C-alpha cells in the first residue's frame, strides 16, 4: 500500500508539473496571438513528437521528454543590419558568425510567407515584454492560487501550548531525524531534559519561571534563551496544575532568522500540538513575499550551490538538504510526502500543493533572469530596444531600429549548454545521493 501511495504522489506531482508547463506556454501564446504574431507550434516536452494536431495555423502536441515546453513564434530574429557600405554589422566570421547566419537563414524560411506586421521582432517593445513575461507571470499566478488555496482553504498549522511529543534524547539539528543512540553504545545521546523532568503528552504549558505563556513561540523563545539554566514550568495535567523543574541542555538548533545556519541554544525536548488555522489575504500576501525572497536568493545562489551538488553526485560529500533539486528529486519528495504515515491525509495534500506552488515560483523567478535563452533575456532585449530608441528620439537622431538579439546567440547557446549540464548533474545527484524528508 505504501509503494502504491508513493507512486500516486509522484504521478500526481508530475501531472501538476506538466499542467504548469503547459499553462506557462499558454501564457506566452495567448498574448502573442492577441498581438497578431504568428505562432506555428505549441508543444509540451522536447524530443520526438508523441502526438500532435493542427488547429488553424498552429500545431499543438506533446513530445517524449516532459522537461519543459515551447511555442514557436515567427520572426524572433531580425534581419542582419548593414553599414553604409552594405556590410553586415556584428559577428560575421568564424564559428559564431556562421551560427548566427544559419539561424537568420532558418528564420527567413519560416517568415517568407508571413506579412511583415506579424513578425515578432516587428512588434512594439511593450508587446514583446508582455508576450515574454506571460509565461513566468502565469507561474506566479499558479503559485498564488496554490499557496492561497492551501492557506485560505485548508489552513496553516499553528503550534499550541499543548505537548504532543516528548523527546527521548537530544540530537543535534544537523543530524536529522535519526534514532537515539543509547547505552551501552559508545557516545550515547544525552537524555532530554523534558524526559527527565516528567513531561507527558497532553500537558498544557501554563507558565515558565513564573511568567504566563500566551503562545508556543513565546515559550520556545524562553527555553532557547535559558541556554542550559534551571527552569520551572507549570503545566495543566488533566485539569490540575503541576510544576516540573529541570535544567535545559545547550544544543545545536536551527537559527530562527536564518534557517541555513545553526546556533547553540537551550533545549528542553517537547514538541507542540498543532491546529489548522485558515488564513486571510494578508497572511497569503506576506507569506508569498517571504517565499519570493527566499526563492530569489536560492536562484542567485544556484551556481555556488551546484559545486556541492556536483560533489554529492560523485559521492564525495553528503548532499546538502538546502541544495537545488531536479524534477526527479522533487518527485521523490512528493512520493515521500504522499506515503508518510505519520502525517494525516489533509496535511499530505497541503504539502504536495505547497511543493507544487514553490516549484512554480522558482520557475517564474528563474525565467525572469536576464539571460538568453530564458524569457528574461528576451525581455531585457526588448527593454534595451525601448531605451535606445527613446534616447535617439530625445537626441533628435535617426531611429536605430530593432535590437539585434541574434548577436547574442553565442551567449544563448553557451547558457543553454550550461543549463543542460546542470540539469544532468542534478538528476544524477537526485538518483545516487538524494534529498529525503528524513534528511
Image (cartoon, rainbow, N blue to C red):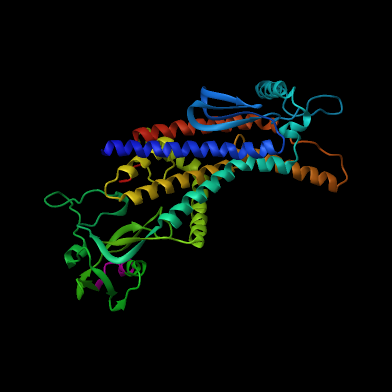
Residue at the image point whose x is 54% and y is 44% from the top: 139
230 magenta-colored: yes
Query: Above or below — where is 264 with respect to 331?
Result: below
Quarter holding the N terminus is top left
**Which region of the structure is painted magenta?**
223-232
Q: Going by the picture, which residue comes out furthest to the front?
A: 55
Q: Can residue 363 be seen?
A: yes
Q: Going by the picture, which residue comes out furthest to the left?
A: 184
Residue at the image point whose x is 11% and y is 50% from the top: 184
Q: How many marks?
A: 0
Query: Above or below — where is 198 with respect to 397?
Result: below
Query: On the rendered structure, is 23 left or right of 166?
Result: right
Residue 110 figure quarter:
top right
Q: Going by the picture, which residue comes out furthest to the right?
A: 396
Query: Above or below — where is 84 with respect to 252?
Result: above
Quarter holding the C terminus is top left
Q: Can residue 404 be seen?
A: no
The spot of residue 90 in percent (x, y) is: 74, 29
The spot of residue 285 in percent (x, y) is: 52, 58
The spot of residue 339 in percent (x, y) is: 30, 42
Residue 14 figure quarter:
top left
Query: Above or below — where is 276 with respect to 10?
Result: below
269 magenta-colored: no
Residue 228 figure quarter:
bottom left
Residue at the image point whose x is 31% and y is 39% from the top: 5
Q: Nearer the viewer, residue 183 or 101?
A: 101
Query: On the rendered structure, is 167 left or right of 287?
Result: left
The spot of residue 7 in percent (x, y) is: 33, 35
Amino acid at each position: 500500500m505504501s509503494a502504491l501511495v508513493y507512486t500516486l504522489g509522484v504521478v500526481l506531482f508530475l501531472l501538476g508539473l506538466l499542467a504548469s508547463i503547459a499553462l506557462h506556454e499558454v501564457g506566452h501564446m495567448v498574448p502573442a496571438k492577441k498581438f497578431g504574431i504568428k505562432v506555428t507550434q505549441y508543444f509540451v516536452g522536447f524530443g520526438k513528437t508523441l502526438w500532435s494536431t493542427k488547429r488553424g495555423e498552429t500545431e499543438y502536441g506533446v513530445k517524449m521528454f516532459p522537461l519543459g515546453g515551447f511555442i514557436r513564434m515567427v520572426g524572433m530574429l531580425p534581419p542582419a543590419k548593414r553599414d553604409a557600405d552594405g556590410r553586415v554589422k556584428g559577428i560575421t566570421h568564424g564559428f559564431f558568425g556562421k551560427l548566427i547566419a544559419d539561424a537568420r537563414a532558418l528564420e527567413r524560411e519560416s517568415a517568407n510567407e508571413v506579412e511583415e506586421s506579424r513578425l515578432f521582432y516587428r512588434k512594439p517593445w511593450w508587446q514583446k515584454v508582455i508576450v515574454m513575461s506571460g509565461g513566468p507571470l502565469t507561474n506566479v499566478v499558479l503559485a498564488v492560487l496554490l499557496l492561497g488555496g492551501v492557506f485560505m482553504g485548508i489552513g496553516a498549522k499553528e503550534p499550541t501550548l499543548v505537548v504532543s511529543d516528548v523527546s527521548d534524547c537530544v540530537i543535534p539539528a544537523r543530524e536529522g531525524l535519526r534514532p537515539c543512540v543509547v547505552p551501552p553504545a559508545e557516545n550515547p545521546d544525552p537524555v532530554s531534559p523534558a524526559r527527565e523532568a516528567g513531561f507527558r503528552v497532553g500537558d498544557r504549558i501554563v507558565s515558565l519561571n513564573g511568567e504566563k505563556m500566551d503562545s508556543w513561540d513565546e515559550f520556545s523563545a524562553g527555553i532557547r534563551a535559558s541556554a542550559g539554566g534551571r527552569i520551572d514550568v507549570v503545566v495543566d495535567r488533566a485539569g490540575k496544575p503541576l510544576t516540573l523543574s529541570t535544567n535545559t541542555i545547550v544544543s545545536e538548533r536551527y537559527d530562527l532568522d536564518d534557517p541555513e545556519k545553526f546556533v547553540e541554544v537551550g533545549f528542553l525536548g517537547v514538541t507542540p500540538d498543532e491546529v489548522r488555522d485558515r488564513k486571510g489575504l494578508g497572511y497569503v500576501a506576506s507569506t508569498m513575499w517571504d517565499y519570493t525572497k527566499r526563492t530569489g536568493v536560492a536562484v542567485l545562489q544556484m551556481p555556488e550551490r551546484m559545486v556541492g551538488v556536483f560533489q554529492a553526485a560523485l559521492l564525495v560529500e553528503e548532499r546538502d538538504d538546502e541544495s537545488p533539486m531536479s524534477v526527479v528529486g522533487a518527485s521523490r519528495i512528493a512520493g515521500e510526502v504522499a506515503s508518510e504515515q505519520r502525517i494525516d491525509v489533509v496535511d499530505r495534500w497541503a504539502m504536495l500543493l505547497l511543493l507544487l506552488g514553490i516549484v512554480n515560483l522558482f520557475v517564474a523567478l528563474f525565467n525572469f533572469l536576464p539571460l538568453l535563452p530564458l524569457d528574461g533575456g528576451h525581455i531585457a532585449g526588448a527593454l534595451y530596444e525601448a531605451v535606445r530608441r527613446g534616447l535617439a528620439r530625445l537626441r533628435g537622431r535617426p531611429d536605430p531600429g530593432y535590437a539585434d538579439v541574434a548577436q547574442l546567440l553565442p551567449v544563448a547557446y553557451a547558457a543553454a549548454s550550461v543549463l543542460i549540464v546542470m540539469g544532468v548533474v542534478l538528476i544524477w545527484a537526485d538518483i545516487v545521493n538524494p534529498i529525503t524528508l528524513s534528511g
